[in-house]
Image: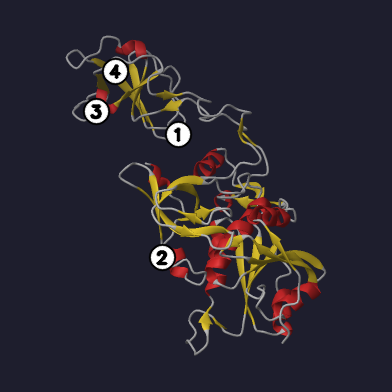
Amino acid sequence: MRKNHYHEEMLSVEDARDKILENFSILPSEEKPILDSLGQILSENITAKFPIPPVNNSAMDGYAVLSVDTVGSTYIQPTKLKVIGSIPAGYVPTKKIESGQSMRIMTGAPIPDGADAVIPFEETDEKTRDNLDYIACNSEMKKGDNIRLSGEDVVKGEEILSSGTLIKDAHVGVIASLGKSKIKVIKKPVISIISTGDEILEPGEKIKPGKIYNSNAYSIASMVMSNGGIPNIIGTAKDSEESLNMLLDMAYNSDLIVTSAGVSKGDYDVVKDVLFKRGKIKLWSVRMRPAKPLAFGVLDINEKSVPHLGLPGNPVSAMIAFEQFGIPAIKVMMGKKDILKNPFKIIIDDEIINYDNRRVYARALVFKAEDGKLHANLTGSQSSGVLTSMSKANALAICPEDREKINIGEEINAIFLDDIDDLFF
């Protein structure tokens, strides 16, 4: 086979990312059940059609009373009130409370006419009384005590959530409290993933000499899922144009096609030949380590133009390239505002060597040290084929392009890979 004869352009990480992201925009909206919308971006304004709570209701289990009837009440000199009924949650009281009367009431039940306070069970002789027709009030209540007023949480006509909101747990509850079962959200992007190479086996197959398991597809699919996209592992293309073309044809409903391997200088040209025949593809050398080789462009898939991101074949290179270029594209398509992760400062406890003027993303484990500051150790071999050091890392420590070495004890930037809220508390 011919060796690589395609022109490669050298780009910074930022330039490569900008060139990629200009090909993506927010996807259309879809209507989904509220529970299924978690993690998506709202594409409509949510307005309350009624107040919440809809009526004045009890904040506690107790007795609805007239506050004036309890003036001067103590454990020594309690006030006795006649019990004229009971109001469970979900039922509307039909009686009006007059002076000297009360009604047993549960949390959330509507306040009966005439009552202006609720005395908790704990402030009565609820547990010890013999006569169920009367209750002894042991405390003085003020007007409004233990009553949730109508509209206290939400006023009728109030905009509760605006378009562009990232739907979180509490939002789902609020939307449900408004009686809505479905909402409009930005669609989740479908990311089709294709591995390449005769040497690839699927997990579960028996290992054979010269073969390796397909870790890349599953790592990338997991990253897609954890960032809100829908992964579609199409399969592994053998080292033939026919095999790769067949799998590409199966990706026609994708919002992004991701391939791994076949884009490096030393690779044979099967992958490159197919990509260049089917679309406008650029091969780049990105000034970063790992993940220097990268391909991006738009492929013609069954008369539909679909963006394509070609990742390196080494497992860590593929993951870090997807972290820097694939995940931001997913976030753009989902309408998210924070496209890039914010860097934070760490004190590095190992040296980082930079021997070729590229930006180094070193796999690191960040922890809070005894000095109260965030420190980090490298997680082992930084070879692009060592996936275990990636699995032990919760961050990428960054050595800039213009530095040959980061010394032990230096404060540098890092970006988190995981949810690490516990480090700050």
Foreground label between 2 and 4: 2
What residue occupies the far left of the structure in this picture?
A: 76
Q: Earlier in the sequence, mark 3 or mark 1?
A: 1
Quadrant assignment for the C terminus: top left
Q: Position of residue 32 (x, y in %)?
A: 63, 52
Residue at mark 2 to residue at mark 3: CA–CA distance: 66 Å
Res 380 label? 2
Foreground label between 4 and 3: 3
| Residues packed near mark 1 inside 10 Å, few (<14), some (14 to 19) or many (20 plus) | few
Residue at mark 4 to residue at mark 3: CA–CA distance: 12 Å
Looking at numbered disc 2 in the image, what kind of residue is underneath it? Gly
* Residue at 52% from the left image edge and 67% from the top image edge: 316
Q: Which residue is mark 3?
A: 126
Residue at mark 3 to residue at mark 1: CA–CA distance: 22 Å
Q: Which residue is mark 1?
A: 91
Q: Which residue is mark 4?
A: 81
What residue occupies the far right of the structure in this picture?
A: 303
Looking at numbered disc 4 in the image, what kind of residue is underneath it? Leu
What residue occupies the far bottom of the structure in this picture?
A: 209
Q: Relative to residue 290, is residue 247 depicted above or below?
A: below
Residue at mark 2 to residue at mark 4: CA–CA distance: 75 Å
Residue at mark 4 to residue at mark 1: CA–CA distance: 22 Å
